Structure formats: structure tokens, C-alpha cells
Amino acid sequence: MIGAGTSVAANALIASGARIGASCVIHHGAVVGHAPQDLKYANEPTVCEVGDRTVVREYATLHRGTGERGRTVIGADCFLMGYVHIAHDCHLGDRVIMANAAMLAGHVHVGDWVIIGGITPVHQFVHIGQHAMVGGDCAFRRTSLRTCWPETIGRL
């Protein structure tokens, strides 16, 4: 399903599990709603929902959920730059910006108005609260948040 006013560029793949809102822009080579890269996935029907007015730039990959949750959700008014990867069962709030090559592993939750810098991997099951700004080239693992900001960890 593709909403009214949405444009899809050449060589983009909109797979059967995609649910794309109105007035979105899907750029060249993007992949939306393809099967998740998860060994537990057993071909069950799942979805990837993209909110209204979201921009998906070149070669970004947005995968469907798995049987556990069944859906990946990207909010409205998001800007996902080139080579961004959003894995299965992630949830992005509204107005999220992900810079080039930022990557979310499965089951990551990102609040509204979050900015994630480029070349930033986020480990599975991490929660990034609303209005957070994650610096570029900074890995987020569940056990080593002190790696990036030791002076602020006590305030998280």
C-alpha cells in the first residue's frame, strides 16, 4: 500500500510488506518492506509501516518485523539519509533524522525528534529517548554506553 502523493524513484524496491503513508519520497535504490534479516523469521506475514511525509534516501533499507512483534514502524516526517538500515521490529517516532550509514539492529526504539549521526551502529534492544542527539561514528551497545559520554551517563 502506497499513500496518495508519494513518489517512488527508479530502482527502488517496495516489497509486499510495505505500508507507506501519504506524501513520502522514496529515492533511487531504497528498499522498503523486504523480509527481515533474522534467523527466527519463518516467512510469516509482517509489515514495515512508514509514516506520512517521510523521506527515504538512496540505498536505505527498511525491513519488516518478525513473528515476535510483526511490524517495523517509522513515524511521520522522518528523514532517512543514504545507506541507513532499519532492521526488524524497530520503532521510530516522528521527526527522526538518521544521517548516512546509521544502522539500527532489531528491536530498537527511537523516540520523537531524535537525530542519529552518520556511521552510527545501534545494538539490538537499545532505547533512545525523545529529543536525543547521537553523535556520528559512535557505537551504541547495551553494555557500554559509557564509551561515548562518560560524563553524562549518570544523568541518563
Image (cartoon, rainbow, N blue to C red):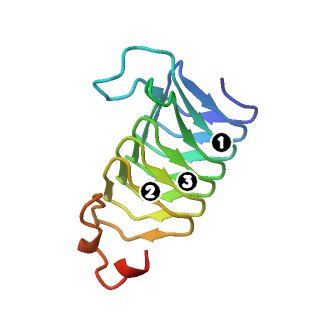
Numbered disc in front, either 1 or 3: 1
Name the secondary structure under disc 1.
loop
Numbered disc in front, either 3 or 2: 2
Q: Looking at the image, tell me whether mark 3 or mark 2 is earlier in sequence order.
A: 3
Q: Is residue 129 toward the left or the right of residue 19 in the image? A: left
Instruction: Name, please, the residue furthest toward the right.
Output: 4
- Which residue was labeled with disc 3? 79
- Separation of marks 1 and 2 at Cα, in angstroms: 20 Å
Question: Could you tell me residue 52's position as x and y percent?
Answer: 69, 43
Q: Residues within 10 Å of mark 3 (few under 14, many from 20)?
A: many
Label ID, residue 127: 2
At label 1, the amino acid type is: Gly
Instruction: Name, please, the residue furthest toward the front.
Output: 154
Q: Is residue 74 above or below residue 131?
A: above
Q: Looking at the image, tell me whether mark 1 or mark 2 is earlier in sequence order.
A: 1
At label 3, the amino acid type is: Phe
Q: Is residue 60 toward the left or the right of residue 37 in the image? A: right
Q: Does residue 11 appear anywhere in the picture?
A: no
At 67% across and 27% down in the image, what residue appears? 2
Label ID, residue 51: 1
